[in-house]
């Protein structure tokens, strides 16, 4: 078993494109669930909106990526308003069911709209405008050392991705220590108390939903650019559930929580997968087959989520007192 | 190209969905880890009903004279090795297929460092489903399908609603109770060699004991003692759902299965509509089961206690009701009902690891529509949802049929948050 290879693969994934997509979306969820206490189970809907915005603008309309990004932001805001105005008055469990239902409606709808490519989705040079800006010289084939390296394109994606994460993390950090952030956290703790201080809690919750939703939309745009494709069946509720796992693992309502959570989540997932793969192919592990490796990772995700929520709901960085959320 | 029958096209749809989901599972984690040389392009060729089209030839051409070819197999799939970081042109040879290709037979595909999938659809175009004219026969056939679906939803939603009512848990793993029930019956049926008529009751009993009572004893009871919050418990149930689902894939694989008996039953002609005898019998049993359950909740001592706990656990407890006993009873009942729903679904469609997951949102829609925690509400809501799902295909594409029910739920929540039969209380 080549542990050097397994480790470098896992680290590459922990900071790679997939982790970045989930991390951006998880930062949005952290704003909504962690700071605002909004049980948004439909974050994947925002991701889908963002991905389709750039995908359809570039491939179907033939316009530029930058226009697509603006449309993505606007549609993210629109979805947050559409979803938030009627539902933010509902109790937490109702909000969860309605948001998950809304995200499924978006997925079903995008599958049936021919303009969005139906079940096949949108495929094409979505990120061409972005790749044209790649500063890494074309003479470089791979950047990094040994197994731990990225291709020129991936390197550009990863650097941009982490720059986006740094920016929105900084924004979240600044907002949450502002007076606005204190009101938001106050609403999570005791909405009635904040309301009695004369704050329009409904408006604050709506703003929180919009902010987190736009972050989610960013994740979708990034994913569309990185993959060169938007496929509706990538936007299943499990996406949102995985975001919750990362968020809770890293530490809910902590600025660095989603970053740490996403990186560790992907590190562990790839580490387990690669170790089992190596083990099976080298004959060390004989009681499972290669096709059973995929499910094992998700079994571990599920068990991990349960154990975390039961024994350490504050995750790695969190503060237990900040997580006394409750419905009813 | 032979034309498939209606039932088998539905099965193919299910299979495609599963392939898609599995593909997602793979793409979530596996995809980027492939090295630059061994990327794979998957080409799927299907008709408008998503039936696989075998023997279609595809060629893939890229820069630097790269060229590869493939022919689709029985699953309609052709696997072609491709280089990374390039743009290739995928061409489907129109001479090898009998129908025109929707959106053209040439596709430009940008390949980065991940595997890719390209789907060609064959047919006359114009989107899937919803198109054909509305006839009385079609309405009646869909209505019948809707009623059958309603029984399955009602069996599961009743348990979901009871568990929510007595414990406050929004159980995201309730769909898996249905799946577990079906798979328990499948094991007894295929590995145990029991006829499904005998296997089903045994599976329901095992489900009630293990998956219902056992689950409550091992997981939810300790959590209640620990004072775990309801949101935390909700998230735990999501973890449990993921765990159970992938345990089933681990042991049984992802492919859909059928019970040994009654798998391909010929439908009988009942005037305007076609029905299979198994649908009629299973629906008949469902009517009896639901009636007995509701009657039991209304008149029996434990049933009354259940409703008292649903109403106000603290007050019921202080009036001498053994709350934990009631909760155990509710889990046993809920798991048994869900297991029957699983066998029902498995007999009329397929036994597959996603069967409960797909229906979970319709259960929620039913329970919320009827009024969260009310018994009659869950059943009324189930019929509204089940019939809406089926009848909506008259007007909207098939992909949107579940969306129609979810949309209905959201609208109703806005106008009447307590649901159709619920009492006015705080939901905000």
Image (spheres, coloured by chain):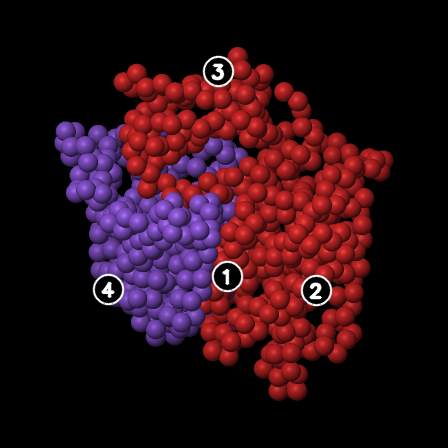
Chain colours: A purple, B red
* Label disc, if present, on residue B93 of the rendered structure: 3
Report the mark closest to the observer, 3 or 2. 2
Q: Position of residue B260 (x, y in %)?
A: 71, 45
Q: Position of residue B66 (x, y in %)?
A: 32, 19
Report the side of B199 relative to B409 (left or right). right
Between marks 4 and 2, how big is the CA–CA gap?
57 Å
The residue labelled by disc 2 is B205
Between marks 2 and 1, how big is the CA–CA gap?
21 Å
Report the mark closest to the observer, 4 or 3. 3
Label 2: chain? B
Report the side of B172 relative to B208 (left or right). left
Labels 3 and 2 touching (C-beta < 8 A): no
Residue B302 to residue A35: above or below: below
Between marks 4 and 3, how big is the CA–CA gap?
62 Å
The residue labelled by disc 4 is A178
Report the mark closest to the observer, 4 or 2. 2
The residue sitting at 57% across, 73% down in the picture is B217
């Amino acid at each position: 078993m080549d542990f050097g290879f397994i480790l470098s693969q896992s680290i590459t994934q922990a900071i790679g494109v997939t982790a970045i997509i989930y991390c951006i979306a998880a930062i949005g969820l952290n704003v909504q669930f962690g700071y605002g206490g909004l049980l948004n189970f439909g974050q994947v809907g925002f991701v889908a909106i963002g991905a389709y915005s750039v995908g359809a603008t570039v491939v179907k309309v033939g316009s530029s990526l930058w226009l697509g990004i603006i449309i993505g932001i606007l549609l993210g805001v629109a979805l947050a308003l559409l979803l938030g105005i009627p539902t933010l008055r509902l109790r937490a469990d109702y909000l969860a069911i309605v948001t998950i239902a809304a995200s499924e409606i978006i997925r079903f709808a995008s599958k049936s709209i021919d303009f969005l490519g139906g079940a096949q989705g949108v495929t094409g040079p979505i990120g061409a405008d972005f790749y044209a800006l790649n500063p890494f010289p074309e003479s470089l084939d791979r950047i990094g050392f040994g197994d731990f390296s990225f291709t020129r394109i991936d390197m550009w994606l990863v650097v941009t991705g982490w720059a986006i994460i740094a920016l929105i993390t900084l924004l979240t950090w600044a907002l949450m220590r502002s007076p606005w952030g204190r009101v938001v956290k106050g609403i999570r703790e005791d909405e009635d108390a904040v309301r009695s201080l004369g704050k329009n809690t409904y408006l604050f919750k709506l703003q929180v939903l919009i902010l987190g939703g736009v972050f989610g939309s960013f994740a979708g745009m990034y994913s569309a650019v990185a993959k060169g494709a938007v496929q509706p069946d990538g936007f299943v509720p499990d996406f949102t559930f995985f975001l919750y796992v990362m968020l809770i693992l890293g530490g809910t309502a902590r600025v660095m929580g989603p970053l740490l959570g996403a990186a560790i989540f992907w590190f562990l997932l790839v580490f387990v997968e690669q170790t089992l793969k190596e083990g099976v192919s080298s004959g060390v592990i004989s009681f499972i087959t290669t096709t059973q490796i995929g499910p094992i990772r998700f079994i571990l995700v599920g068990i991990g989520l349960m154990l975390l929520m039961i024994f350490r709901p504050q995750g790695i960085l969190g503060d237990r007192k900040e997580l006394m959320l409750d419905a009813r | 190209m032979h034309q498939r029958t209606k039932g088998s096209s539905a099965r193919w749809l299910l299979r495609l969905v599963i392939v898609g989901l599995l593909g997602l599972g793979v793409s979530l984690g596996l995809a980027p880890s492939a090295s630059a040389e061994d990327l794979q392009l998957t080409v799927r060729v299907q008709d408008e009903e998503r039936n696989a089209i075998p023997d279609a030839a595809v060629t893939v051409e890229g820069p630097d004279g790269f060229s590869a070819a493939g022919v689709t197999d029985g699953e309609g799939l052709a696997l072609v090795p491709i280089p990374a970081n390039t743009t290739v042109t995928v061409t489907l040879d129109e001479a090898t297929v009998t129908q025109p290709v929707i959106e053209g037979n040439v596709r430009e595909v940008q390949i980065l460092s991940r595997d890719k999938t390209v789907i060609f659809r064959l047919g006359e175009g114009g989107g899937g489903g919803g198109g054909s004219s509305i006839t009385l026969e079609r309405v009646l056939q869909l209505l019948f399908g809707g009623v059958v679906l309603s029984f399955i939803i009602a069996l599961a939603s009743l348990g979901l609603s009871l568990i929510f009512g007595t414990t406050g848990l929004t159980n995201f793993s309730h769909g898996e109770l249905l799946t577990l029930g079906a798979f328990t019956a499948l094991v007894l049926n295929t590995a145990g060699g029991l006829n499904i008529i005998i296997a089903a009751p045994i599976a329901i009993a095992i489900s009630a004991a293990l998956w219902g009572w056992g689950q409550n004893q091992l997981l939810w009871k300790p959590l209640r003692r620990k004072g775990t919050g309801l949101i935390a418990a909700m998230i735990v149930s999501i973890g449990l759902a993921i765990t159970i689902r992938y345990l089933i894939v681990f042991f049984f694989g992802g492919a859909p299965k059928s019970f040994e008996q009654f798998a391909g039953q010929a439908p009988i002609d009942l005037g305007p509509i076609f029905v299979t005898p198994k649908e009629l019998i299973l629906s008949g049993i469902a009517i009896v089961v639901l009636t007995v359950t509701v009657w039991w909740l209304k008149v029996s001592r434990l049933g009354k206690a259940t409703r008292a706990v649903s109403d106000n656990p603290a007050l019921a407890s202080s009036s001498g009701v053994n709350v934990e006993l009631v909760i155990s009873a509710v889990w046993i009942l809920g798991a048994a009902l869900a297991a029957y729903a699983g066998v029902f679904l498995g007999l009329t469609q397929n036994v597959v690891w996603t069967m409960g997951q797909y229906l979970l949102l319709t259960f929620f829609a039913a329970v919320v529509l009827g009024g969260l925690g009310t018994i009659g509400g869950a059943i009324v809501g189930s019929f509204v949802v089940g019939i809406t799902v089926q009848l909506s295909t008259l007007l909207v594409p098939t992909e949107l049929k579940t969306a129609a029910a979810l949309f209905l739920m959201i609208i109703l929540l806005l106008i009447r948050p307590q649901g159709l039969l619920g009492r006015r209380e705080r939901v905000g």
